[in-house]
Amino acid sequence: MRKTLLCSAALVAALGACAQKNTTAVKYAQYITVADAKKHLSIIASDAFEGRETGKPGADKAAAYLAGEFKKMGLQAPVNESYFLDIPLTNTAFTLKSVTLNGTTLTYGKDYTSMGGTGTQTVKASEVVFVGYGTEAELANVDLAGKVALVIAEPKPGTTVDNSNPRAAMMAFTRLVQGIRAKNAALVLAVGTVTQGSMAGKQSERITLKQANPRPITPRPLALTVTSAVADQLLKASGKTYEQLKASPAVQTVKADVTADYETVVKDAKAVDVLGFLPGSDAKLKEEVLVFSAHYDHIGMEPEDTPGDRINNGADDDGSGTTGILEIARAFTQAKKDGKGPRRSILFLGNVGEEKGLLGSEYYSEHPVFPLANTITDLNIDMIGRRDPAHEKTPDYCYLIGSDKLSTTLHKISENANNTYTKLAVDYKYNDPKDPERIYYRSDHYNFAKHNVPIVFYFDGVHADYHRVSDEVDKIDFPLLVKRAQLVFYTGWDLANRDERPVVDVKNDMPANRN
């Protein structure tokens, strides 16, 4: 009993100590301000940066701005005296040059859209194979090798399909096209609405990390969605309309002249992560590194023929997080100038390519400037400037993800920082492994966590302006952005100055990939 009483007394004393504010930390947290945050974000999310798409001039401008701010603050340039870590990329660009049916050139977006293809080819055919609804039975005994296939892109009568779920409908459409591609068709024409398959476009680019031994591109047949009016034009020589053929969808071959011209060009590309380094003050602990990360890239611009605003400014995603690390860097560098600098070293990491598949952070985790064995934690900020619909009545909140996935110590540090200083309503909804959004796998912290580096991910949730041109600076709640950034700062202050680093004491049971 006495032993239990002593432990309880010690626990109470420890909790009491945790509840006491560190006045030095409080002083420097005040350097994270609404005015300064607004100044940075108004530049980062301006039209001049053109949506900050990886591999485009706008992202280069954002990188230069970050590096310039790091230099002003006195952060060291740790990549051979540069703030830039080159991220070698491969750009695979697809261009659909033209499509003609019976001598008439079709108009993209009006007559057809594209699911894309790979390789470079000009398809010419004088006949089309109609395969009905493209069911397994309809495709079983038909030879489509090198031919043009015409298919009805809607559920076969009697088939149960949840049309209220756009994702399910798109997956069903994709499976339909894949089934025909598997028969080695040269071109797939799916009759449906022109919104189907529009994820590829007439021109599209895919950015990936450059591989030392890249696999050759496997040619993949072009697939288009065409309107029923185009199908009628295609069938003109047969004397039948599309509706007549649809009414009795037997597999058959019809005469029609079809030409499609497309190409795929693969070339090297480059972007940069931006690194600013603050050396620690403790002779021993300065070898250990705390990382604050945020991705500065976004999704760029809508196609040139898009009416109205074309620029996806990404004020919240992730201009807000990028602004957050600039503000946190300002607080820590000021403390350093005043002789109150952190005992451990700190890396401020602006990642590129997050929107393309976490590319910048993946490259850094595989080619770290500072050993991952010495990296004690990554505090990753991705969207901290808005509220989601679930929190309209509880505005002072933040989603925290991952704090308990690898380290019980880190989770306690995180909880204590909030309970002592910011007192936000912490929501762990997305920390649930069963949550369908799988947010834990969708930002740059993941590439640290998969190497057993403990992480905390700070997030404001998904709102109506996510990945839209309407994600603008005037919708940012700057006082809330500041409060969330201060939570990250206080958590980092503890991590950078405590005697012991967080212990990795939770088994890493993450899948080998995040898909």
Image (cartoon, rainbow, N blue to C red):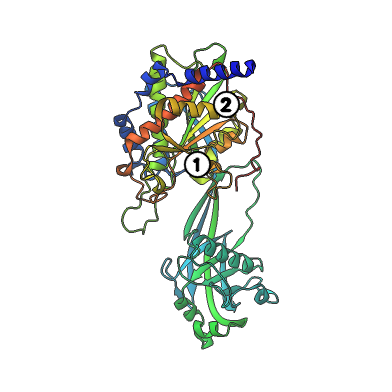
Look at label 1 and name its amino acid: Gly
Whole-angstrom CA distance, mark 2 to mark 1, is 31 Å
Mark 1 Cα shell of 10 Å, populated few (<14), some (14-19), many (≥20)? many
Q: Are marks 2 and 1 in contact (CB under 8 Å)?
A: no
Residue beneath disc 1: 353
Q: Quadrant of the N terminus?
A: top right
Indicate whether 128 appears above or below 354: below
Quadrant position of residue 2: top right
Quadrant position of residue 172: bottom right
In the image, which disc is placed on residue 94?
none
Q: Nearer the viewer, residue 485 or 327?
A: 485
Q: Nearer the viewer, residue 135 or 353?
A: 135
Where residue 201 sits: x, y (%)?
47, 60
The residue drawn where x is 39% and y is 48% is 389
The residue drawn where x is 42% and y is 21% is 332
Q: Nearer the viewer, residue 83 or 155?
A: 155
Where residue 352 sits: x, y (%)?
48, 38
For mark 1, give the secondary structure: loop
Look at label 2 and name its amino acid: Thr
For mark 2, give the secondary structure: helix
- Which one is in front in this view, the residue at disc 2 or the one at disc 1? 2
View extreme (bottom): residue: 239
In the image, which disc is placed on residue 409?
2
Decide if residue 107 is on the left or right side of residue 171.
left
